Amino acid sequence: MPRITNKVVIGLKAVLIIWCIKEDILEKLTIEGHWAYGEYNFISILDFDNSRELEEFKEKLRHLIGDEKFKVYLVKYEAKNGIDLNDISNDFTVKMKHKL
């Protein structure tokens, strides 16, 4: 019998684009990504456990580089109920996906 909890797990996937950033500032963020469109532009795909984690990351970016130098595009939103997916087959997996 699958274990069921009241917890809902929410996952977010986002694309981060930063422009006019130097490597020494980018190193403070400790994120992986790629330089794009020239020497000072950066792109990354990020995963967050929930929207609060995403907002905290964006706030850290605002303090570090300013409001006008980055954009975060939410590209995937996923929620799963509290069923332990290791205990059940894929036929009973519960997923909700919403693409923006």
Image (cartoon, rainbow, N blue to C red):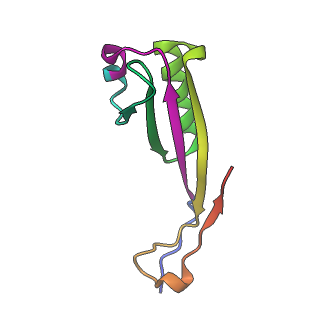
Does residue 19 appear to the left or right of 97 in the view shown? left
Magenta residue span: 9-26
Q: Position of residue 75 (x, y in %)?
A: 60, 47
Q: Position of residue 87 (x, y in %)?
A: 42, 80
> Which residue is rendered at x = 64% and y = 65% of the image?
96
Q: Position of residue 97 (x, y in %)?
A: 63, 62
Does residue 33 appear to the left or right of 97 in the view shown? left
The one nearer the camera, 42 or 36, is 36
Magenta residue check for 18:
yes
Quadrant assignment, res 91 = bottom right
| For residue 48, above or below residue 62 | below
> Which residue is rendered at x = 46% and y = 14% of the image?
64
Magenta residue check for 33:
no
| For residue 37, above or below residue 22 | below
The one nearer the camera, 94 or 2, is 94
Q: Position of residue 14 (x, y in %)?
A: 54, 42
> Which residue is rendered at x = 46% and y = 83% of the image?
88
> Which residue is rendered at x = 37% and y = 34% of the image?
34
The one nearer the camera, 87 or 99, is 99
**From where the camera sits, is residue 9 visible?**
yes
| For residue 26, above or below residue 76 | above
